[in-house]
Structure formats: structure tokens, C-alpha cells
Image (spheres, rainbow, N blue to C red):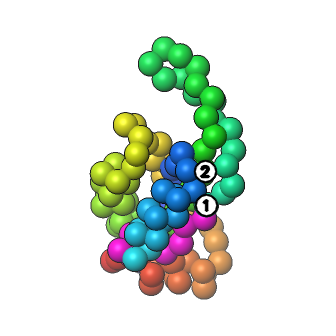
Amino acid sequence: MCSAILVFTTFPDIDTAKRLAEELVQAKLAACVNITPAGQSIYMWEGKICKESEHLAVIKTTDNCYKELELFIQAQHPYELPEIIATPISNGSKNYLTWLTTNTKT
């Protein structure tokens, strides 16, 4: 069985977040995407401190899907340099993780 992972990315607006989340699920690159309400991001960009409102997307997928998912986000994302961070899921409900794996590409 492939390993389940969480991938995090942020979006500048809810419509873009929803559209890309739906496309990821339809393409079976993600089993589920949770989108949080807008929060504040403070970061350094081109030598300046930026403060922006962003929506966080938490993408549930597998390590087998990661590379294609990363390329998809990079191609479709409105940011020049989108945040794309993955972390393994070390534990979880067996039934949920089976569902996650079943609903992503193998």
C-alpha cells in the first residue's frame, strides 16, 4: 500500500481554491481537500515583508500522486512561487487511510 501524505498550499481567493481542489479530486490526485477560511500570512518576498489574506488547502493524497499533484499545482496556481509542502501521515484510522488510497491514483 502506498503511503498517505498531507500536502499544504495556500490560495489568494476562495474561488481559485475551490476550483483547483475540485480538479484535484476529479483527477484522483487527491481523495479530499479541506479549505480553511481566509487567514493572515506574513512572509518575506523580494526583500519586503508582505501581509496577505490567504486560504489554506490541506490535501489528502498519497506519495504516489505527489509529483503529478505538485506539477498540477505549479501549472494552475496564480502565484509565481506557490507554497507546496508535503508531510507523511504516520498514523490514522485504517478505514480512513484505506478510503484515501482507494480514491487516489495508484
Tell me the amino acid under the disc marked 2.
Answer: His
Q: Is residue 33 above or below residue 75?
A: below
Which quarter of the image is occupied by the N terminus?
bottom left
Question: Image quadrant of residue 3?
Answer: bottom left
What label does residue 35 carry, if any? 1
Question: Image quadrant of residue 64?
Answer: bottom left
Residue 47 visible in the snapshot: yes
Which residue is depicted at the point 63% across and 29% down? Answer: 51
| Separation of marks 2 and 1 at Cα, in angstroms | 6 Å
Image position, residue 49 (x, y; %): 58, 20
Nearer the observer, 96 or 40? 40
Residue 33 is one of the magenta-drawn residues? yes
Instruction: Report if the CB atoms under discs 2 and 1 are less than 8 Å apart.
Output: yes
Q: Is residue 43 left or right of residue 105?
A: right
Report the span colored magenta. Answer: 27-34
What label does residue 49 carry, if any? none
Mark toward the start of the polypeptide (2 vs 1): 1
